[in-house]
Image (tube, grey):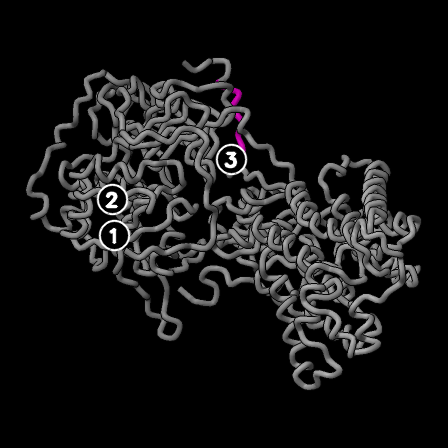
């Protein structure tokens, strides 16, 4: 029978009375897991040294997060994996020769300047990973170009300087013949730690899509924008302009389309907005690659489009009965 | 049978507790019933009995003041012991007639079976339905008779001529989908009260001018042969909808799925579009009213959740205190957390177990203290999951930011009023933002400002 004492102790609240198991930390953890293939390919081609870079980046991100939490007297947000993801992504965008001090400075500044000054996770206008990347890029541009020839683990090759595909073909368009699809897929090319292998980024992206952490609109928008825009110019003059497939497979484009552009806080929420946002990132990337001074351009394109996110969010789905008249 | 699918809303996981039993059990007649005069949205009824008067089942104890209400009938026979202020299940205070049962359960003299009810004129049947005071469930409680007859008030005026517009009723939808998953009641009713269902559909076909009848059933339950034969015979189209995807059973969402009809809130009603939706239990009550002249004094409700010992589909008298219903289901299990009228997504948490079962109660859901969720309200992380699930295609994340910062006019401009409060956005939110709560507050503020 019902206990008389408990009669008055019922919880009363608004509906709904159940919640899904989804949470911020679960989303961030999914992102981290999806990045593991890229980490593995980076380690395979550039050696164990990259683990130190990634570890330092993650550690300084977390330290900066803890420091800011302490300073602003807020509950600790270390446990929600967002600082870990921030550090990991920033590390993957670095060339394998990045010195430790630049990594520490860039990673902690990305948290402090990119994220915490705006009020922590959920409030910043621009992707903090890209803010960190831009800080290092502007402060020490030479360090960002420290690319080396990949040497698979246990092969014992020497470390020699080399140019990543996009830089090489910008200097000499005929170089494009030396990059076949399979090589770009696996990532046996010079480049940033996490962006060399197209296959690992695709695997991670499919995992994110499967878990429902990101929606298809942004990646598809980026691919479509980049491919279509590159295709137009490639059709006009195949000698100077590279085919769309080459643009998709090289540089940060795949990692950007799956991990950087759909970053929840700085990307739009509406389906239409996400698609336009993705398309414009794709188009802008190819514009920068063709006519810009930078050879990659994905990060700059995403940063610029992040600014427009509130505008893209104005492309709303039509709600019920609006403009139809009863 | 066409299988349509709403690509919105939430597909629920199978419940962790054992499924709701598939048999309707009547619970013992309560020793005392509380009959609130306010069991509908609108003005309360006026008690028409005195303290101490003797009543039988079906006697009128409260009369409505206007068309928004309907009479209140005694649901047990006995003596009126008190007329007092009580809390109703929606948290409002209302005068109520409290009757002590004499245990005999005698029906009023005017309740008799009319075998020739089908030969009666529509107006006679309409009066019977009106007198039976059947309340619609699944939406705001209103007398079902308003869904069946042409409304007296024009729904609008022609923009050029200024003539009033009446939209004739052409489609009547019988909703056999549970409002929320896990109820498990709606499809049982079809078979357990088959005779009343048949009488109900026949009556509805006589009294309305509708030409198209659709019965919406849940794909996860198969329709029995007798119901299939009946619908074939009466030319009622049976359409399957995906009831596992919440909120398919909510009237407005069901119409979107069946007829691709989008009815805006709060000024749009299905009747404006020539459509009516009736829950299957209302149809059964209509059948009883037409054939047996019985008013709505009973209700089949589903009692479920981890917090109750025996999950049951129970047949209870209107006005039975919640305590008695829970006691008939073996009492509360574990440490009780929330007792909710309705389901986990749209239900109303109760603070008092003396609240009576009212005419629009569909289910009682009991949570243990361990199951009670505590929202943290993290800032919105802009993930867009709420936009993905919103069945009325709003942008809940943006609306929630507006409501949080008192920007109610901006929220109204983004169609805040269209929200059906289904709770899908809160359910999926990784930041656990209490969006339904914010929207309710925002809507009330918008209404206050509109009225000046």
For disc 3, the neighbor class at 10 Å (few under 14, some 14 to 19, many from 20) is many
Q: Chain of mark 2?
A: B
**Residue B419 among those drawn in magenta:** no
User: In this figure, which residue is indicated by the disc labeled 3?
Assistant: A17
Pick the residue in front: A172 or B187: A172
The residues colored magenta run A7-14
Residue drawn at x 46%, y 33% as measured from the top left: B91
Q: Secondary structure at mark 3?
A: loop
Pick the residue in front: A198 or B395: A198
Front position among marks 3 and 1: 1
Marks 3/1 same chain: no
User: In this figure, which residue is indicated by the disc labeled 2?
Assistant: B223
**In the image, which disc is placed on residue B238?**
1
Residue A107 image point, x, y percent: 85, 49
Is disc 3 in contact with disc 1, using a CB cutoff of under 8 Å?
no
Earlier sequence position, callout 2 versus callout 1: 2
Residue drawn at x 72%, y 77% as measured from the top left: A242
Is disc 2 in contact with disc 3, using a CB cutoff of under 8 Å?
no
Marks 2/3 same chain: no
For disc 2, the neighbor class at 10 Å (few under 14, some 14 to 19, many from 20) is some
Q: Residue A76: which quarter of the image?
A: top right
**Residue A9 among those drawn in magenta:** yes
Marks 2/1 same chain: yes
Residue A122 visible, this orientation: yes
What separation in Å lies between label 2 and label 1 (alpha carbons)?
9 Å
């Amino acid at each position: 029978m019902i206990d008389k004492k408990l009669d008055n102790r019922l919880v009363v609240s608004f509906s709904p009375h159940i919640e899904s198991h989804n949470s911020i930390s679960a989303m961030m953890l999914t992102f981290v897991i999806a990045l593991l293939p890229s980490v593995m390919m980076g380690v395979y081609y550039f050696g164990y040294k990259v683990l130190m870079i990634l570890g330092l980046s993650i550690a300084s991100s977390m330290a900066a997060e803890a420091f800011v939490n302490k300073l602003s007297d807020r509950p600790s947000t270390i446990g929600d994996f967002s600082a870990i993801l921030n550090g990991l992504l920033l590390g993957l965008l670095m060339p394998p020769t990045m010195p430790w001090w630049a990594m520490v400075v860039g990673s902690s500044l990305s948290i402090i300047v990119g994220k915490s000054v705006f009020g922590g996770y959920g409030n910043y206008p621009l992707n903090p990973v890209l803010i960190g990347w831009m800080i290092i890029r502007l402060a020490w541009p030479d360090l960002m170009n420290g690319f080396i020839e990949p040497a698979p683990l246990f092969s014992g090759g020497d470390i020699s300087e080399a140019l990543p595909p996009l830089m090489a073909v910008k200097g000499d368009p005929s170089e494009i013949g030396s990059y076949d699809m399979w090589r770009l897929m696996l990532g046996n090319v010079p480049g940033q730690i996490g962006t060399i292998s197209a296959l690992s980024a695709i695997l991670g992206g499919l995992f994110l899509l499967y878990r429902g952490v990101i929606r298809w609109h942004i990646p598809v928008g980026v691919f479509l924008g980049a491919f279509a825009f590159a295709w137009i110019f490639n059709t006009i003059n195949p000698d100077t302009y590279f085919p769309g497939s080459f643009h998709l497979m090289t540089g940060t484009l795949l990692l950007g389309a799956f991990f950087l552009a759909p970053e929840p806080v700085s990307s739009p929420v509406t389906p239409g907005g996400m698609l336009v946002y993705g398309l414009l990132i794709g188009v802008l990337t190819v514009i920068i690659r063709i006519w810009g001074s930078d050879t990659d351009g994905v990060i700059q394109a995403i940063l610029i489009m992040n600014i427009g996110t509130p505008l893209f969010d104005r492309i709303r789905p039509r709600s019920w009965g609006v403009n139809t008249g009863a | 049978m066409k299988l349509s699918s709403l690509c919105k809303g939430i597909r629920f996981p199978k419940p962790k507790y054992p499924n709701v039993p598939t048999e309707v059990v009547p619970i013992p007649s309560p020793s005392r019933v509380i009959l609130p005069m306010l069991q509908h949205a609108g003005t309360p009824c006026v008690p028409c009995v005195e303290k101490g008067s003797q009543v039988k089942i079906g006697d009128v104890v409260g009369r409505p003041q206007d068309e928004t209400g309907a009479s209140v009938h005694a649901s047990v026979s006995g003596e009126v012991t008190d007329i007092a202020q009580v809390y109703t299940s929606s948290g409002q205070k209302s005068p109520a007639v409290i009757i002590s049962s004499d245990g005999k359960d005698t029906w009023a003299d005017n309740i008799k079976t009319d075998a020739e009810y089908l030969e009666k004129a529509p107006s006679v049947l309409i009066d019977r339905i009106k007198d039976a005071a059947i309340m619609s469930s699944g939406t705001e409680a209103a007398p079902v008779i308003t869904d069946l007859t042409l409304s007296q008030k024009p729904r609008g005026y022609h923009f050029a001529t200024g003539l009033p517009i009446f939209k004739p009723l052409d489609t009547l939808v019988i909703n056999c989908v549970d409002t929320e998953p896990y109820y498990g009641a709606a499809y049982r009713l079809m078979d357990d009260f088959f005779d009343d269902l048949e009488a109900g559909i026949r009556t509805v076909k006589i009294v309305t001018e509708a030409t198209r009848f659709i019965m919406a059933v849940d794909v996860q339950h198969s329709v029995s042969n007798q119901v299939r034969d009946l619908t074939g015979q009466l030319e009622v189209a049976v359409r399957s909808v995906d009831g596992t995807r919440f909120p398919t059973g909510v009237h407005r969402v069901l119409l979107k799925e069946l007829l691709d009809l989008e009815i805006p809130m709060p000024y749009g009603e299905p009747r404006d579009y020539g459509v009516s939706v009736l829950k299957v239990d209302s149809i059964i009550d209509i059948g009883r009213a037409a054939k047996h002249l019985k008013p709505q004094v009973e209700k089949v409700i589903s009692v479920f959740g981890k917090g109750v010992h025996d999950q049951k589909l129970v047949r209870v008298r209107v006005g039975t205190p919640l305590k008695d219903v829970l006691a008939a289901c073996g009492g509360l299990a574990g440490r009780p957390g929330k007792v909710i009228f309705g389901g986990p997504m749209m239900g109303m948490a109760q603070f008092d177990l003396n609240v009576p079962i009212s005419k629009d109660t569909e289910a009682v859901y009991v949570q243990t203290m361990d199951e009670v969720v505590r929202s943290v309200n993290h800032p919105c992380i802009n993930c867009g999951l709420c936009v993905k699930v919103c069945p009325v295609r709003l942008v809940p994340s943006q609306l929630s930011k507006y409501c949080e910062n008192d920007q109610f006019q901006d929220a109204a401009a983004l169609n805040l009023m269209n929200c059906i409060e289904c709770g899908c956005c809160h359910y999926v939110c990784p930041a656990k933002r209490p969006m339904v709560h914010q929207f309710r507050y925002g809507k009330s503020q918008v209404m206050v400002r509109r009225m000046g």
